[in-house]
Image (cartoon, helix red, strand yellow):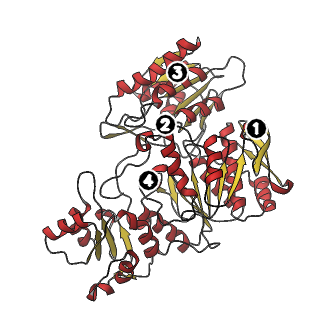
Amino acid sequence: MSEQNAPGSHSGPAGEVPASRFRPSAVAAVRLDSIGEAIGIPVPGTSAEVGVTGISLNSRTVEPGDLYVALPGAARHGADFVPQAVDRGAVAVLTDEAGARLVALSADTAVPVLVVDGPRNVVGPLSAMIYRSQPAPGQPPRLFGVTGTNGKTTTTYFINALLRSLGQRPGLIGTIEILAGGDPIPSLLTTPESTDVHALLALMRERGLDAASMEVSSHAVSFQRVDGVVFDVTGFTNLTQDHLDLHGTMEEYFATKAELFTPRRARAAVVTVDDEWGRTLAATAGIPVITLATTDAAGAADWTVTATAARGLGTEFTLSGPGGVTVQAHTGLPGAFNVANAALATVMVLASGVDAAAVQAALSSHDPFTVAVPGRMQLVSAEPAAVVDFAHNTDALARALEAVRSPLRGSRVIVVFGATGQRDQGKRPAMGAIAAQLADVVVVTDDDPHDEDAAAIRADVLAGARTAQAEGGLTSTIEEVYPRAAAIQRAVELARPQDTILVAGPGHEVWQEVKGVNLALDDRVELRNALTARGFNVLQDERIES
């Protein structure tokens, strides 16, 4: 992250991943006068010949040869850290007028200082220039970007699984992990800073990867983390209420997402038109759009899901496209939304130029959409069915509850969830109401309170649940249990073998943030331990470290 610690993902522990994990092993130097020319700043004298081989927003991740970008922050200016950056090997500094004044007031700076209005605006393009990260059209790695409120992570995993089934080597930049052909790099943000994004793309090219899939959140667009990236294909999943603490209104939230569907950010798009936002995006995007409909209510589209049939916990489905082309597919993950995610992944790969016959052969022989996605409808036990999911907004919670409902006579759905602190407060009672309407037993607990009072957050959720119960004449049982580990234990105490437990919220995350302190907490571990203590059998999964 940059020195100002911009907001990031749902939650996560503080810390820095070494810059070398993100970077290619060799970068040809770019002269500082070329960088100056790119941003309209003359670089005189011997400074013009300084060679730059990297770029960093954080003095702690500077490596020798870097351009250090000193940005203004909420508490301190990045210029305060110029001495540390230079000590670590920075060969030049880029900052604004305020930063330049701070640098001038400190000890003599032994490296050139470039001053520009709005330095944040040039970080992405400069990163692309320094790392030469942007491939020419049609050249590897082909870039897939997925945005929307729900389904981004699973869709990127599905794209990568399908590409592997096609014999390709894909990379991944996402919420859970970053894959660049080697060991996974833990991800602390949905999308890393633009400096790291471009370094990663250059690393993937260096390692000979064929493609890369990236989750692109509205935060990533707002905080300019994907500036300078041009995707070969962008995909849109859906838009539901979330992140209004940042965007204010749904219209602003949509407008931020829509920026990805413009010529400076993408060459082509696949847009799911199941909701009105998708239909609006398809009609207004400034790039070629292929539309996808996965529900009957969506109306006409280029590709449609025309038939579905249950198969185990998952679904078999048919995709029908232009010219009578059909593709038969299957996902082992439960829920209609995972059919939508798998369909979007399929059409995005087709839109990148892969032949439909090759895609069908890969789907038939490898079943790529049954790949396990950590914390996304992740099955921990079968009797009772116990599932952990990242559902942390109203729509995602509704979809998850509908997906886990068992057809077994007399079975119940028991849900454990809470709401995140310092986020959109309006969704808290709505989440409570949805839980009361779609679950039989509702256990309200804490998610990540952050710096808010946890009891007040629970009260907002409980109010929504109890109002829905009273107004709808619902028979659901509603309990308040905290801390979160105790709530999970309570759900398991109440469960019978034929029931389903859904633990919703953090998903793959292994920390709970309370008053600035990160407490170790993994829903999957807590659920597995509680099930084992009661004598239930649990499924083996190497990603759950109990």
Mark 1: few/some/many CA within 10 Å (<14, 14-19, 20+): few
Residue mark closest to the camera, 2 vs 3 = 3
Q: Earlier in the sequence, mark 2 or mark 1?
A: 1
Q: Which of marks 3 and 4 is nearer the N terminus?
A: 4
Residue count near mark 3 (Cα–Cα under 10 Å), binned few <14, some 14–19, many ≥20:
many
Residue annotated with mark 2? 525
328 sits to left or right of 97: right
Question: Is the residue 60 above or below the residue 491 in the image?
Answer: below
Q: Name the residue type under label 3.
A: Val
Asked if marks 3 and 4 touch (Cβ < 8 Å), the reply is: no
Q: How far apart are marks 2 and 1 (CA)?
A: 39 Å
* Mark 1, residue position: 296
What residue would you read off at disc 4? 222
Mark closest to the chain's N terminus, 2 or 3: 3
Residue 142 in view = yes
> Farthest right residue?
324
